[in-house]
Amino acid sequence: MPKSKKAAKSFIGPLPQGVKRKARARKVKSSGAGPKNGNGAKTSQVKQAHVHHACSILDPFCPAARAAKRPDGQGGSSIGFTVRGHNTIATDATGAAMMTFVPGLGRYGSVSSTLAAGTWSANAAWSVLNGSDFINTNAGEVRIVSFGCIFRSIASATNCQGVVNMFTIPNPLVSYQLPALSSNYPETRMMPMTSGMETSWISKPVGSKAHTFRPYSEATTTMTDFDWSSLVVEISGGPVSTTIGLVEYVCNVELTLKTSGLSTTGLGGTVTKPRPANPVALQIQSKVHTSMDSFVTGGVSKIESAVKTAAADAFDAIGSFGLGLLGF
């Protein structure tokens, strides 16, 4: 008679010689937490959190970048501040226009140009950025954390024509001259004007001083020493004497207060400690700035997606050796 399952399970006596008892497989209840790295943190969550952390200093339009400070532990107590505004671009009697956007320590930021005999000549002074009066009144030292622009076509579908040429330049001079439809730059986008088009642009560090604080007194209407790259927007063949484009800009800065302002302005309580140093986030930022193009076709959502993808790729390239430095 075959043995029943019950009988087999109930047998606890010694086995015959030469027969080994099979080890029962132990069931391990899954916590659903997912794989963990050597630091005991969930790999996927750490990665996404760190990408988000890096995006706060990479994408100026990201909510996490609003008034964000650079995570290098430097600068002492400071205030994070965001300058945000827009400039419209209107064509001249030939259907052309040019405007340059510079990161003037969060205070100065744009200048228009005039076309004559195939050459653009910029005006003699940088204009004041909207919303930068706070910096002008209170800043002792300033450094830029991130800076970017979004170009939008605002002409009607029946009145939208011509070409928009956008390119990145370092340290433009006031009253500089450029030939029309310049394209001899490492990062250039030339495309036909279409109704509702959007193109985003992110500024990148220029030189070794980009992440250091500078005296606010260096911000002037004729400054030429910029620590971050600048954007030029040129329109050719558009409708004549028409407001055809709009450029939205965002500049996130970190500033220290003037010594005299600590007691007289009542802002002393808003000053906070430096953001903790995060070497991995800074390395990701460096890799993204090196590998990613400054231009992204589309608006806020497109540039957010592009930056997150680039930051995740940079994170993968760095590997897991830096996870212990995350600080989460």
Image (cartoon, rainbow, N blue to C red):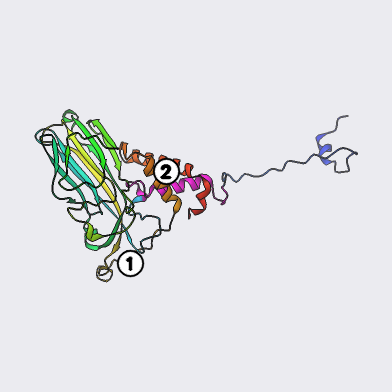
User: Disc 1 versus disc 2: distance between alpha carbons?
Assistant: 34 Å
Residue drawn at (33%, 64%) of the image: 271
> Would residue 292 be visible to someone looking at this image?
yes
Q: Amino acid at mark 1?
A: Gly
User: In the image, is 133 to the left or to the right of 203?
Assistant: left
Q: Position of residue 266 (x, y in %)?
A: 27, 68
- Crowding near pointer 1: few (<14 within 10 Å), some, many (20+)? few
Contact, mark 1 vs mark 2 (Cβ under 8 Å): no
User: In the image, is 322 to the left or to the right of 154?
Assistant: right
Q: Amino acid at mark 2?
A: Ala
Q: Quadrant of residue 133?
A: bottom left
- Crowding near pointer 2: few (<14 within 10 Å), some, many (20+)? many
Say whether residue 49 is magenta: yes
Q: Is residue 237 above or below residue 99?
A: above
How many numbered marks, from 0 up? 2
Q: Which residue is mark 2?
A: 311
Is tag 1's residue or tag 2's residue first in the polypeptide sequence? 1
Q: Position of residue 82 (x, y in %)?
A: 29, 53
Q: Which residue is mark 1?
A: 269
User: In the image, is 14 to the left or to the right of 95?
Assistant: right
